[in-house]
Image: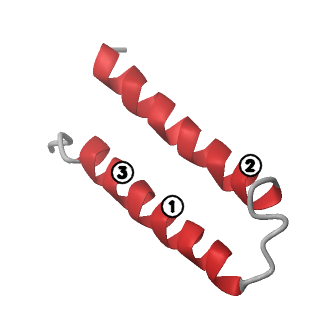
Amino acid sequence: MERRGVLWGVAVLFLVATAYVVPYTLLSSVDAWYGAFLFWIVFGLLAIAVIAVITSSWRD
């Protein structure tokens, strides 16, 4: 596998790890709904951006 593919694979694994770690650790003591809402908005935008970059080089 080329180096770029490994780098983006690590980015995806990092995003998946943050999806599990952040809500149960950093946001566990936040009682306001907007704490989790902001996290999931930022997470969703980052996930979309990473997937768009990964799939942009795909060709038929």
Q: Which mark is residue 24?
A: none
Front residue of 36 and 29:
29
Q: Secondary structure at mark 2?
A: helix
Front residue of 29 and 46:
29
Q: Quadrant of residue 2?
A: top left
The reply, left or right, for residue 56 in relation to residue 52 is left
**C-alpha separation, residue under disc 1 versus residue under disc 3:** 12 Å
Q: Could you tell me the amino acid type at mark 3? A: Ile
Point out the tag, 3 or 2, that comes first from the N-terminus: 2
The reply, left or right, for residue 20 in relation to residue 43 is right
Q: Secondary structure at mark 1?
A: helix
Q: Mark 2 packing: few (<14 Cα in 10 Å), some, or many (20+)?
A: few
Query: Please, is residue 29 above or below residue 9 in the view?
Result: below
Q: Residue at x 83, y 64 (%)?
A: 28
Query: Please, is residue 8 above or below residue 44 in the view?
Result: above
Q: Residue at x 30, y 42 (%)?
A: 54
**Quarter of the figure with the N terminus:** top left
Task: Please provide percent x and percent y for residue 26.
Answer: 75, 56
Q: Which mark is residue 21?
A: 2
Q: Could you tell me the amino acid type at mark 2? A: Val
Mark closer to the observer (3, 2): 2
Name the residue beneath numbered marker 1: 43
Mark closer to the observer (1, 3): 1
Q: Secondary structure at mark 3?
A: helix
**C-alpha separation, residue under disc 3 versus residue under disc 2:** 21 Å
Front residue of 30 and 20:
30
Q: Could you tell me the amino acid type at mark 1? A: Phe
Task: Please provide percent x and percent y for residue 44.
Answer: 47, 65
Name the residue beneath numbered marker 3: 51
Point out the tag, 1 or 3, that comes first from the N-terminus: 1
Task: Please provide percent x and percent y for residue 39.
Answer: 57, 67
Answer whether labels 1 and 3 touch (C-beta < 8 Å). Answer: no
